[in-house]
Image: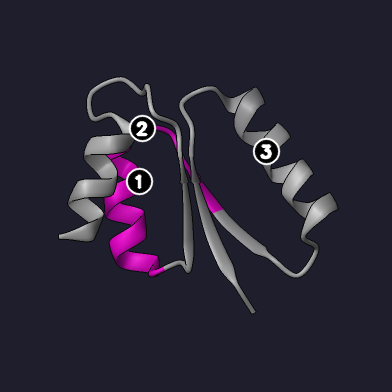
């Protein structure tokens, strides 16, 4: 089973993405939603999802910075 993590600071957008993913890719197991970039890095390293959906503009650490940190 493919696993995913969503990083989005706007809760409604995160839930909309989760719902769309469930509709379009029912086999995908979406775990927690990270509310900011630093949490996304922490959760991604702990949970090791197959895919991470990152919001580019988040307070503190951007999605691009989080992707770089996860990749290291």
- Residue at image position (54%, 60%) is 4
**Residue 5 horizontal/vertical position (percent):** 50, 54
Which of disc 1 and disc 3 is earlier in sequence? 3
Q: Secondary structure at mark 2?
A: loop
3 vs 1, front mark:
3
3 vs 2, front mark:
3
**Residue 47 horizontal/vertical position (percent):** 40, 67
User: Nearest the camera: 56 or 6?
Assistant: 56
Q: Find the distance from the CA under tag 3 to the CA under tag 1.
A: 16 Å
Residue 38 within the segment the image draws in magenta: yes
Identify the residue under disc 3. Answer: 17
> Disc count in the image?
3
Q: Main secondary structure of the magenta part?
A: helix
Identify the residue under disc 2. Answer: 36
Quadrant, the N terminus: bottom right
Which of disc 2 and disc 3 is earlier in sequence? 3
Kindly indicate the quadrant of the structure image that contains residue 49.
Answer: bottom left
Residue 70 within the segment the image draws in magenta: no
When the figure is inspected, residue 50 is found, relative to residue 52, above or below; the finding is: below
**Residue 18 horizontal/vertical position (percent):** 69, 44
Q: Residues within 10 Å of mark 1 (few under 14, many from 20)?
A: many
Query: Which stretch appears magenta?
Result: 32-48
Quadrant, the C terminus: bottom left
Q: Find the distance from the CA under tag 2 to the CA under tag 1.
A: 6 Å
- Residue at image position (78%, 53%) is 22
Q: Find the distance from the CA under tag 3 to the CA under tag 2.
A: 16 Å
Kindly indicate the quadrant of the structure image that contains residue 31.
Answer: bottom right
Identify the residue under disc 1. Answer: 40
When the figure is inspected, residue 47 is found, relative to residue 32, above or below; the finding is: below
Give yes or no for contact between labels 3 and 2 (Cβ–Cβ under 8 Å): no
Give yes or no for contact between labels 2 and 1 (Cβ–Cβ under 8 Å): yes
Q: Residue furthest bottom?
A: 1
């Amino acid at each position: 089973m493919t696993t995913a993590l969503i990083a989005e600071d706007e809760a409604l957008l995160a839930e909309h993405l989760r719902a769309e993913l469930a509709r379009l890719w029912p086999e995908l197991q979406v775990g927690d939603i990270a509310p900011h970039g630093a949490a996304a890095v922490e959760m991604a390293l702990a949970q090791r999802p197959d895919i991470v959906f990152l919001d580019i503009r988040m307070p503190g650490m951007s999605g691009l910075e989080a992707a770089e940190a996860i990749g290291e």
